[in-house]
Image: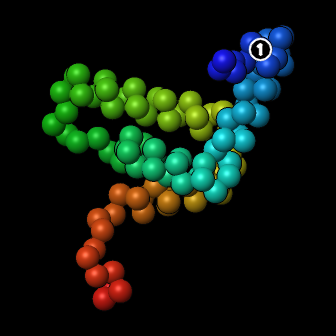
Amino acid sequence: MWNCLRRRAPSRRSRASELERAYRSVFLCPDGETVLADLAAECGIYQAPPVDLGPRESGYLDGRKALYARILSMIRIPPEEHAALQAAARLETLPDFEHEEDF
């Protein structure tokens, strides 16, 4: 049986703090940080959207960014960690080079 918030925390107030705790335990660890950087790069949260996006594509991109913003709002990282996350996300968007040791 899948666990859900209502089973873990009976009151509305305890659900809010339990949900924040759960998000933080998932995303504020080395693997979670890697996933967050990948998600940020994948949804383009720190990049300008392409200029030729149609309304449907633009809405889709906005939805992806909104979901990522939800995660960020739940983990409440300080500004210096947010800057590090942005830097990690930008690294994810750089092209791979065949012979990186040559550079």
Q: Residue at x 40, y 58 (%)?
A: 92
Label 1 belongs to which residue? 7
Counting other residues with Cα less than 10 Å from the Cα at mark 1, is it few (<14), some (14-19), or many (20 or more)? few
Q: Quadrant of the N terminus?
A: top right
Q: Position of residue 2 (x, y in %)?
A: 65, 20
Q: Position of residue 33 (x, y in %)?
A: 59, 52
Residue lying at 38% horizontally and 40% vertically, measured from the top left = 43
Residue 77 in view of the camera: yes
**Residue 45: x percent and y percent?**
42, 42
Foreground residue among 29 and 57: 29
Image position of 48 (left or right of 50): right
Q: How many marks?
A: 1
- In this picture the colour scheme is rainbow
Q: In the image as oriented, which residue stretches furthest toward the bottom?
A: 102
Mark 1 element type: helix
Name the foreground residue: 7 vs 69.
7
Residue 53 position in % (x across, y down): 19, 33
Q: Quadrant of the C terminus?
A: bottom left
* Amino acid type shown at disc 1: Arg
- Place residue 7 in its image quadrant: top right
Which residue is rendered at x = 59% and y = 38% of the image?
Answer: 72
Residue 41 higher or lower than 67, as above or below: below
Q: Is residue 46 in view?
A: no
Above-or-below relation of 93 to 75: below
